[in-house]
Image (cartoon, rainbow, N blue to C red):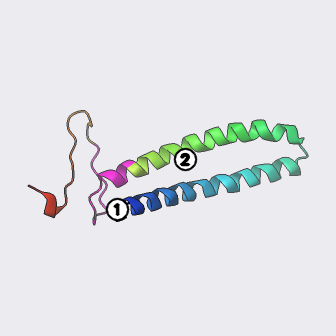
Amino acid sequence: MPDDDKSLWRETAQIIAINLFPWVISVLILRGLLALLQIPNAVFIPCLIVWSSFFFFVIGRFIIEVLRVYETTPPGTSERPAKTDPKRYVEIYLPPDRKS
């Protein structure tokens, strides 16, 4: 496996881990809150399903936006690309050594 593929997998794993950590913490808080309020354990699973759906929808949209910006930002810059109509054209960044 080329080194670029390894770094891509490593970055993907880091993104997943970074975004799962808040979910795990929030589930522990949810579990503690239900226990504190003396709500039966049978309620935990439906609450977990609803909370996880909401959480991953919000976090998932954030991840998609971050990845979109990351993919369209040339290496070595921190500029956010201008919002353009993606249907009109797609600009592809080529490193200086690959431009023809």
> In the visual, does 28 lie left or right of 87?
right
Q: Pointer 1 and pointer 2: residues touching (CB < 8 Å)?
A: no
Q: Which residue is drawn at 76% across and 49% down?
A: 30
Residue sitting at the far left: 100
Callout 2, which amino acid?
Ile
Q: Judge whether 39 appears above or below 9 on screen.
A: above
The image quadrant where one finds the N terminus is: bottom left
**Secondary structure of the residue carrying numbered label 2:** helix
Q: Say whether residue 65 is left or right of residue 51.
A: left
Q: Where is residue 38 in the image (x, y as percent from the top left)?
A: 91, 46
The answer to which of 90 and 10 lies nearer the viewer is 10
From the image, tell me which residue sits under label 2: 59
Is 76 magenta? The answer is: yes
Q: Does the magenta stretch include residue 64?
A: no
User: Considering only order in the chain, which callout, 2 or 1, is on the residue closer to the N terminus?
Assistant: 1
Residue 78 locus on image (x, y percent) = 31, 62
Q: Residue 2 carries which label?
A: 1
Magenta region, residue range: 68-83
6 lies left or right of 84: right
Q: Distance between the residues labelled 1 and 2?
A: 30 Å
Please identify the quadrant where the C terminus is shown: bottom left
Circle 1 SS class? loop
Residue 55, compared with residue 100, is above or below; it is: above
Residue 18 lies in quadrant: bottom right
**Extreme residue in the top direction:** 87
Q: Which amino acid does label 1 sit on?
A: Pro
Assess disc 2: are there few (<14), some (14-19) or many (≥20) residues with their C-alpha within 10 Å of its C-alpha.
some
Which residue appears at 47% of the width and 56% of the height?
A: 12
